[in-house]
């Protein structure tokens, strides 16, 4: 079962099908998944218990006032009202009416989630349109065994019947369908890629994954493996540096240039920096640098789950045919993306404009606090820093002595509250006591780990 997938969301699956899915699920509040093919991370997803993705969830909402040309606000019981596009319910809308809706994009910045009245329930291979009762096959499902497809059809029909039954008796706002477990949400997202293997780091998580996959993703269940080594899975597979890089602004390319990514609430700006090539760039070298940057830009957009408008300031090219080659390279690379992405071309000022549909919350929004005019720049969320501390403690390994972590007040508060279960899980894994000491003058992203 793949939460929130639409019938046409699998356009870029072919390039990743058959890769290995690595899942770091030792900490119950944060689950990280990386699809690895050809020695590189080709897809990445992060699920947080404190910031759950609502993509694909179904609600019985209460219609609110009109949201201008965007449609209508709908109260679905979340802190921010969702926005339902106009003319999609098939019947007249009146304020206060109950309406069945599905989340098609998580909230972004100050905006609530995007909603649709066209409810579609998706599995790894099939999508069931609620209004018509018709099924659509997803890419990669052609060679799936008939009995697996038949079982998936039955599951989706049963789920739709349950939703319709609840909708008939529930009082809005009410959540009718969703996945609560972060690990299950992550497995559901990756299931359509049909990884050859799915390796789970975390004994308790492996048991949960096996139960979920047997019921909802039998193909994924076949390749499930438990990571039993002491060394963390991402480190053992040497992908942790790639994952760490996704939180940074600057990515150095092997060929010399670099790309600098600035994510803002309204758009994402990407600059191609000549880097070490400065002072010796000719027309041919600028083209080669832009082509190398195009491949990495498309990859970073995908891995960071950047949505909305993206503008690229590439190195200046002298001939129109060179610009066409860069656009062709970007279109070829973005075609690998599961999320619909459109390369529109050069603007009058020479910038390349791309739009990518919003769906799941971007990685930046999960890791960093919302933009604040009083605090310019990006600031890590206390939860982000807390999970970094716990991963660093895990690298200390098992032992007899207690461990002392000196952290910022916000990090300490998170570990004493929402992150308490994660702290306990790590103590159980390592067989060591972990003590948290709050220091008022310590920045959020600074910490120190010493023997207690």
Image: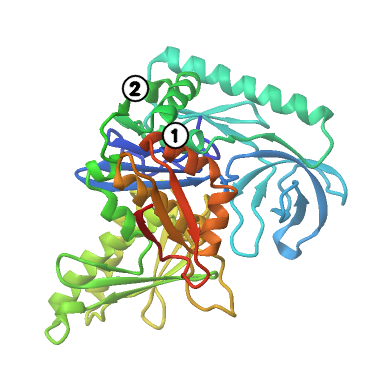
Q: Nearer the viewer, mark 2 or mark 1?
A: 1
Name, please, the residue furthest toward the top.
147
Assess disc 2: are there few (<14), some (14-19) or many (≥20) residues with their C-alpha within 10 Å of its C-alpha.
few
Q: Residue at x 60, y 47 (%)?
A: 104
- Determine whether 58 is above or below 92 in the image: above
In the foreground, 132 or 353 = 353
Separation (CA) of disc 2 from disc 1: 21 Å
Q: Residue at x 14, y 67 (%)?
A: 255
Q: Residue at x 29, y 44 (%)?
A: 234
Which numbered circle lies on residue 187?
1
Can residue 289 be seen at all in this image of the molecule?
yes
Which numbered circle lies on residue 143?
2
- Determine the secondary structure under disc 1: helix
Q: Position of residue 58 (x, y in %)?
A: 67, 38
In the foreground, 71 or 212 = 212
Left/right placement of residue 378 relative to residue 34 reads: right
Q: Residue 320's quadrant in the figure?
A: bottom left
In the foreground, 374 or 228 = 228
Which numbered circle lies on residue 162?
none
Left/right placement of residue 400 relative to residue 287 reads: right
């Amino acid at each position: 079962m793949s939460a929130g997938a639409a019938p046409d969301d699998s356009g870029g699956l072919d390039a990743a099908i058959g890769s290995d899915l690595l899942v770091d699920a030792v900490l119950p509040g944060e689950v990280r998944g990386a699809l690895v093919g050809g020695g590189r991370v080709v897809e990445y997803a992060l699920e947080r218990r404190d910031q759950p993705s609502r993509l694909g969830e179904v609600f019985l909402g209460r219609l609110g006032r009109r949201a201008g040309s965007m449609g209508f606000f709908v109260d679905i019981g979340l802190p921010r009202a969702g926005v339902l596009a106009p003319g999609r319910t098939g019947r007249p809308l009146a304020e206060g009416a109950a309406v069945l809706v599905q989340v098609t994009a998580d909230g972004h910045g100050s905006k609530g989630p995007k909603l649709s009245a066209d409810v579609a329930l998706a599995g790894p291979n099939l999508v069931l349109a609620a209004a018509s009762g018709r099924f659509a096959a997803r890419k990669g499902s052609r060679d799936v065994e008939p009995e697996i497809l038949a079982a998936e059809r039955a599951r989706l029909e049963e789920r739709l019947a349950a939703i319709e039954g609840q909708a008939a008796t529930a009082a809005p706002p009410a959540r009718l369908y969703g996945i609560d477990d972060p690990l299950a949400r992550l497995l559901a997202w990756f299931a359509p890629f049909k990884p050859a293997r799915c390796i789970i780091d975390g004994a308790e998580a492996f048991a949960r994954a096996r139960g979920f996959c047997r019921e909802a993703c039998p193909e994924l269940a076949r390749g499930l493996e438990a990571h039993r080594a002491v060394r963390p899975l991402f480190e053992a597979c040497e992908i942790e540096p790639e994952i760490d890089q996704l939180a940074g602004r600057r990515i150095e390319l092997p060929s010399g240039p670099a790309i600098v990514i600035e994510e803002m609430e309204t758009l994402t700006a990407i600059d191609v920096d000549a880097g070490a090539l400065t002072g010796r760039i000719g027309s041919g070298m600028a083209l080669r640098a832009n082509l190398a940057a195009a491949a990495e830009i498309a990859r970073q957009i995908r891995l960071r789950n950047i949505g909305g408008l993206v503008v690229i300031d590439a190195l200046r090219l002298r001939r129109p045919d060179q610009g066409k080659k860069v656009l062709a390279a970007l279109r070829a690379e973005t075609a690998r993306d599961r999320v619909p992405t459109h390369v529109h071309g050069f603007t009058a000022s020479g910038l390349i404009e791309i739009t990518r549909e919003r769906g799941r919350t971007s990685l930046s929004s999960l890791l960093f606090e919302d933009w604040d005019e009083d605090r310019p720049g990006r600031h890590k969320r206390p939860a982000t820093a807390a999970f970094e501390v716990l991963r660093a403690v895990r690298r200390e390994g098992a032992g007899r002595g207690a461990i002392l972590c000196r952290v910022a007040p916000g990090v300490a508060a998170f570990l004493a509250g929402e992150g308490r279960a994660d702290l306990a899980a790590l103590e159980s894994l390592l067989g060591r006591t972990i003590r948290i000491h709050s220091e008022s003058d310590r920045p959020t992203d600074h910490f120190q780990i010493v023997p207690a």
